[in-house]
Amino acid sequence: MHVCILGGTTEGRLLAEFLNDLNIKAELYVATDYGEQFVKELSNINIHQKRLDKEHMIDLFQLKSFDCVIDATHPFAKIVSQNAKEAAAYCNLKYYRIVRETGKNEDCIYFNSIEDIVFYLNNTKGNILLTTGSKDLDKFTGIKNYEGRIFVRILPMESSLKRAVELGFSNKNVICMQGPFSEELNIAMINSVGAKFLVTKESAASGGFEEKVNACIKTNARCLVLRKPEEEGITLENFKQIIRGNI
């Protein structure tokens, strides 16, 4: 069996380790060199750092003669998943979408879009700890006095820091750290920046979601959550059962 894994996510890493332990050959494709460094050296797994559009995926799938494609990309990377699904169908390959298991937390306020979060925050006062990453930072510049009000927590990558500064976020308000973070560290950060609000994306336990929620509860900060897109797929554990049944 020869498997293609898309995604430098936690699920992608766990899949690579699982397949490696079963002596199944796989190619793991991650979008950044930052994601690559968190996958340990695996004897049966080849790791590639490159961004793939639909045409690149089709060429790759045809060249490598994979038995299946496992899409473990981030749940908010909708375009990548759509491209992978269409490319796999074009190449007549079995496609599996790995979805994250999440549950609604009654201590959070949920939103369907970043625009809804921005509208909500523009009718409030108080500092904001933003933990949604660097990709959508531009949308949060719609918040009044965002330069001084928002504290951005992003990955320690030069490109992420550069983007934040270019968008006008204050240097002293940019925190470059790799998570997931403990409840205690989240509490310390919320208290340090005086945040009344913490903004995050809906995530599984592996993304440190519960630690953020609990930190908000203990600091009386409001946890604002961007819902992940609705999608069809199978969980990581279900996929493992499928593979075990095919060996």
Image (tube, rainbow, N blue to C red):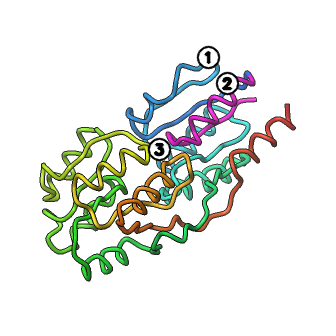
**Which mark, residue 43?**
1
CB within 8 Å, label 2 to label 1: yes
Mark 1 surroundings within 10 Å by alpha-carbon count, few (fewer than 14), some (14 through 19), many (20 or more): few
- Depth check: 108 or 177 in front? 108
User: In the rendering, at what x and y percent does residue 3 appear?
Assistant: 68, 34
In primary-sequence order, the first of circles 3 and 1 is 1
Which residue extends farthest bottom?
123
Which residue extends farthest front?
218
What amino acid is found at the position of numbered circle 2 in the picture? Asn
Tell me: 222 left or right of 210.
left
Indicate the quadrant where residue 16 lies: top right
Dot 1 falls on a residue whose secondary structure is: loop
Q: Which residues are magenta?
A: 1-22
- Depth check: 15 or 61 in front? 15
- In the displayed structure, 86 sits above or below 14; it is below
Tell me: 100 left or right of 32.
right
User: In the rendering, at what x and y percent does residue 156 appear?
Assistant: 29, 38
130 drawn magenta = no
Q: Nearer the viewer, mark 2 or mark 3?
A: 2
Report which residue position mark 3 lands on: 52
What amino acid is found at the position of numbered circle 3 in the picture? Leu
Q: CA distance from mark 2 to mark 1?
A: 7 Å
**Which mark, residue 20?**
2
User: In the rendering, at what x and y percent does residue 71 appear?
Assistant: 61, 47
User: In the rendering, at what x and y percent does residue 75 appear?
Assistant: 53, 56
In primary-sequence order, the first of circles 2 and 1 is 2
Tell me: 99 left or right of 114.
right
- Depth check: 25 or 42 in front? 42
Number of labels in the image equals: 3
**Which mark, residue 202?**
none
Mark 2 surroundings within 10 Å by alpha-carbon count, few (fewer than 14), some (14 through 19), many (20 or more): some
Indicate the quadrant where residue 182 lies: top left
